[in-house]
Amino acid sequence: MQPRMIGSMSPAGFQTRLVSALYTDAMLLADEARSYFDDRSRRDRDTLPPVARVAFSCESLKVTTRLMHVIAWLLTRRAVDAGELSPRAALDPSRRLGEAPLVDRTVVNKLPARARALVAASVALHRRAAALDRAYVTEEPAQSPALAMQQRLAASL
């Protein structure tokens, strides 16, 4: 079955663009998280009680884990797009998106505002990657509001 063309771009082309945009977002967020958790968070962390400091450290590791799962998955998708890896090989469970660590809202709500924002951003990024990952497995384009609108417009023309 031929992929349906929307304008001049196939669904696979949309996915490639989504992967590229997500990769940029992931790298920017990784740099922001590294900068905060390595340098700037010391002052925030030092104001917390001992148990909250441990929770702070755990949440920073969870942010890093989410980001590394997403970045590894995105590098796999880029390898497929570059022809360095077959689409079938990319579906191997070892190359799929890793599970995101769970968020304990009770703990996260007690963290400094910047840490909470980074936790939320890493969760949102992982969810975006998971939606694309599911789209690749089902071999259907990721359904974003913009893509759905383009499909409706193409169908009406």
Image: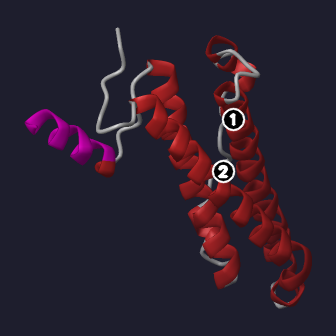
In the figure, 134 relative to 120: above or below?
Answer: above
Residue 14 is drawn in which quadrant?
top left
Which residue, given by chain and number where applicable, does mark 2 sit on? 23
- Residue nearest the observer in this picture, 40 or 56: 40
Identify the mark nearer the N-term, 1 or 2: 2
- Residue nearest the observer in this picture, 121 or 113: 121
Image coordinates of residue 134 in percent, x first then y, are 49, 29
- Label 2 sits on what residue type? Tyr
Residue at 35%, 13% in the rendered image: 2
In the figure, 149 relative to 33: above or below?
Answer: above
In the figure, 78 relative to 126: above or below?
Answer: above
Q: How many marks?
A: 2
Q: Would residue 53 be visible to someone looking at this image?
A: no
Q: Outermost residue, top direction?
A: 1
Q: Which residues are magenta?
A: 147-157
Quadrant of the image containing the C terminus: top left
Res 97 label = none
Using the numbered discs, state the Cα–Cα distance from disc 1 to disc 2 in whole angstroms: 9 Å
Residue 33 on the magenta segment: no
Image coordinates of residue 33 in percent, x first then y, are 77, 69
Which residue, given by chain and number where applicable, does mark 1 sit on? 78
Q: Outermost residue, front direction?
A: 8
**In contact (CB < 8 Å): disc 1 and disc 2:** yes
- Label 1 sits on what residue type? Arg
Image coordinates of residue 44 in percent, x first then y, are 81, 87
Name the element at disc 1: helix
Residue at 76%, 62% in the rendered image: 30
Query: How dense is the environment of label 1, judged by Cα within 10 Å: few (below 14), some, or many (20 and up)?
Result: some
